[in-house]
C-alpha cells in the first residue's frame, strides 16, 4: 500500500461515522420512549382527576324573600310582587383533618406510573348558626313594616370543593 496512513484515516472515519449513526439511532429511541412516558403520565393523571385541594365543609342556606309594593299613582296604581334571592354561608370555627396517602402504581404499557390515594376524615364544629339567620336588609316602602313579606329558606350541606393546582 502506497499511503498506509490514508487507509487508516479512511477506516477511522468509517468507524466514527458508524458510531455516530448508531448513537443517533439510540438517541431517537430514547426520545420516543420519553415522549411515550409523558403521554402515559398524562393518561394516568387524567384518569385520576389530576391534583386536588380539599376545602372543608360549609353550611349553605338559600333564601328567597317576596314582598308587595305599590307602583304608580291614582288610577294607574297597581301592586307588584318583588323578590330577592340570597345565599348565607357558615364556615366551621374548628376543622380537624386526619389523612393518610398511599401510592398506587398504575401501568400503561411498559411504564409504571405512581398515583396517590388519599383517605381523609374531616371533623367540623359550628358553635352557633347565627350566620345562617336572614337579616332584614330591605327598606320596605311602607316605612319598615314587614307586612306582606314572605321568606322561604332551604338549608344545604355544601359539597366539598376541589381545585386543581
Image (cartoon, helix red, strand yellow):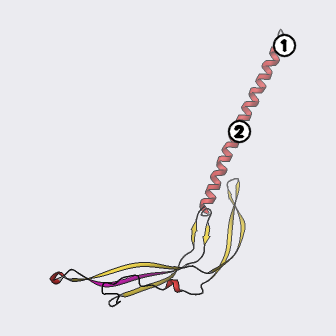
Q: Is residue 101 above or below residue 42?
A: below
Q: Residue under label 1, please give it.
A: 4
Mark drawn on residue 27: 2
Q: Would you identify the image quadrant in which residue 115 lies?
A: bottom right
Residue at 56% across / 78% down in the picture? 58
Quarter of the rendering occupied by the N terminus: top right
Q: Who's the residue at 65% across and 55% down the image?
A: 41
Magenta stretch: includes residue 25: no
- Going from N to C along the chain, the mark reached first, 1 or 2, is 1
Question: Label 2: how many residues lie within 10 Å, few (<14), some (14-19) or many (20+)?
Answer: few
* Residue farthest left in this picture: 75
Q: Nearer the viewer, mark 1 or mark 2?
A: 2
Q: Secondary structure at mark 2?
A: helix
Vertical comparison of 37 with 103: above or below: above
Prevalent SS, magenta region: strand
Foreground of the two, 1 or 81: 81
Q: Nearer the viewer, residue 92 or 15?
A: 92
Residue most extreme to the front: 143
Q: Please report the residue visible at 36 percent of the width from the left and 88 percent of the height from the top.
A: 150
- In magenta, the rendered stretch is 61-70
**Residue 21 point in image, percent of width and height:** 72, 31
Disc 1 and disc 2 in contact, CB within 8 angstroms:
no
Amino acid at each position: 500500500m502506497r499511503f498506509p496512513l490514508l487507509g487508516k484515516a479512511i477506516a477511522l472515519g468509517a468507524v466514527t461515522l458508524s458510531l455516530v449513526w448508531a448513537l443517533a439511532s439510540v438517541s431517537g429511541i430514547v426520545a420516543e420512549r420519553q415522549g411515550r412516558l409523558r403521554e402515559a403520565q398524562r393518561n394516568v393523571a387524567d384518569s385520576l382527576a389530576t391534583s386536588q385541594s380539599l376545602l372543608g365543609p360549609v353550611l349553605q342556606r338559600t333564601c328567597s324573600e317576596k314582598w308587595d309594593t305599590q307602583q304608580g299613582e291614582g288610577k294607574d296604581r297597581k301592586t307588584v310582587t318583588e323578590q330577592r334571592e340570597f345565599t348565607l354561608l357558615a364556615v366551621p370555627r374548628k376543622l380537624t383533618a386526619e389523612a393518610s396517602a398511599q401510592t398506587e402504581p398504575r401501568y400503561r404499557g411498559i411504564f409504571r406510573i405512581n398515583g396517590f390515594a388519599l383517605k381523609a376524615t374531616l371533623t367540623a364544629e359550628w358553635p352557633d348558626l347565627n350566620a345562617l339567620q336572614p337579616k332584614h336588609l330591605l327598606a320596605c316602602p311602607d316605612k319598615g313594616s314587614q307586612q306582606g313579606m314572605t321568606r322561604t329558606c332551604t338549608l344545604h350541606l355544601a359539597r366539598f370543593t376541589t381545585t386543581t393546582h
